[in-house]
Image (tube, rainbow, N blue to C red):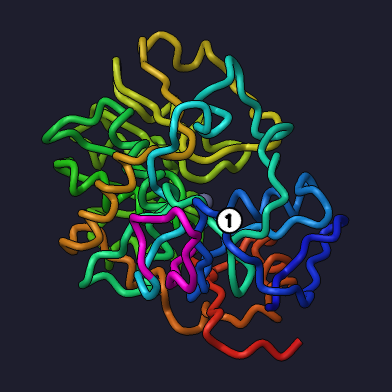
Amino acid sequence: MKAAVYQGDQRIVVEDFPIPEPGPNEILVRIQYSAICGTDVHAFLYDIAPPGSVLGHEFSGVVEKIGSSVETWNQGDRVIGGGGTPPPGLEAPLRRQDQYNYRTEGFTSTRKRGYSEFTVLNDWEPLKIPENVTDLQACLTEPCAVVVRAVRLSNLRLGDTAVVIGAGPIGLLCMQAVKAAGARKVIVVEPVEARRNVALHLGADAVIDPTIEDVNEAAILLTDGSGPHVVFECAAAKSTLETAFRIVRKKGNVMLVALAWDEVPLVPVDWAGKELSFNTTFGSEHYDWITALNLIESGKVSLDPLMSDADIIGLEGIQKAFEGLCEPSTQVQVIIDLNEPSTV
Ligand SMILES: [Zn+2]
């Protein structure tokens, strides 16, 4: 089988491996689609993924083989590569350690994951794909679960106004989850025109171009002069967290969704008087995945504009795709199609 192996120094090479055998409580999954996540791009950009690792955690596939003790899956079942409830003691590190730092603890496993033709999963790990959700859609369940968690932890209430900063894949999913949660108005701040247009197409009530508009003024004007109740920071650009604190209304909520890897300059005296609340979120848990699948299934969150054909690539295009994603780009989502025969 082909798998894209991180070599260190921002290099990924597609290599050949024997197809692994699942252990007694494991299943072998033939991967169909694997989406490239921003955290993997960070792992590449900042060279924190261990050399030899095969990244990718947003994927869909078909059960190819089951271990001798597996009772919950059958060959041919369509699955998403995550979302199951871990047994006690096997929770994700951030849930079980006193303090968690993604920068130093993000990649503890070197198991071959989504950027591969096959992967082995514990039988509790995957979720079944609902019948009316395609394999292509299903590979984006994980980022959708991330925004579901962000909205659930954000204190957003029915009838609130919200601003989403950044219209990358996470921002575009977030604005739809915010709408589904009952926000009265969702405004998206995004410098790239193509992304602003996708946001409008997906139901944003207004968009702000920060390169030509005063974001503070525009956001307050669009929210009855008071500023939004909740601001979702989905950009991780240098100035966007400060922007979130400045535009949120008095006693409003700021939710940090994107992870900035650089120092973020803040001038608290400019906004501390608003007595605002600041929340963070990271990853997702079983219930967030189930909610995400429901939103996708019911059409309340549309993944289609995130999946235009141009952004679907073969495994051999992975190095170029990662390089492209490190630059500011107009691509909204890159998905690796593992159905296509690999040419490397
Ligand atoms: Zn992800």
Instruction: Say which quadrant the C terminus sits in.
Output: bottom right
Instruction: Say which quadrant the N terminus sits in.
Output: bottom right
Q: Residue at x 75, y 73 (%)?
A: 17
Residue 4 left/right relative to 340: right
Residue closer to the observer: 326 or 61: 61
Q: Is residue 330 above or below residue 173?
A: below
Return the residue found at the far front: 68
Q: Quadrant of residue 86?
A: top left
Q: Is residue 296 above or below residue 331?
A: above
Q: Which residue is mark 1?
A: 23
Identify which amino acid the numbered label 1 is placed on. Answer: Gly
Q: Residue at x 29, y 15 (%)?
A: 251
Q: Which residues are magenta?
A: 59-74
* Residue 331 in view (yes/no): no
Q: Residue at x 53, y 14 (%)?
A: 268
Coordinates of residue 59 in the picture (x, y in percent): 48, 64
Coordinates of residue 295 in the picture (x, y in percent): 22, 55
Helix, strand or loop under label 1: loop
* Residue 249 in view (yes/no): yes
Residue closer to the observer: 50 or 146: 50
- Bin the neighbour count of mark 1 within 10 Å (Cα to Cα): few under 14, some 14-19, many 20 and up: some
Residue 231 left/right relative to 204: right
Residue 179 left/right relative to 79: left
Coordinates of residue 210 in the picture (x, y in percent): 48, 49
Coordinates of residue 143 in the picture (x, y in percent): 43, 52
Q: Quadrant of residue 321?
A: bottom right
Q: Is residue 156 above or below residue 323?
A: above
Q: Is residue 275 above or below residue 60?
A: above
Q: Is residue 261 magenta?
A: no
Q: Residue at x 32, y 41 (%)?
A: 288
Residue closer to the observer: 332 or 269: 332
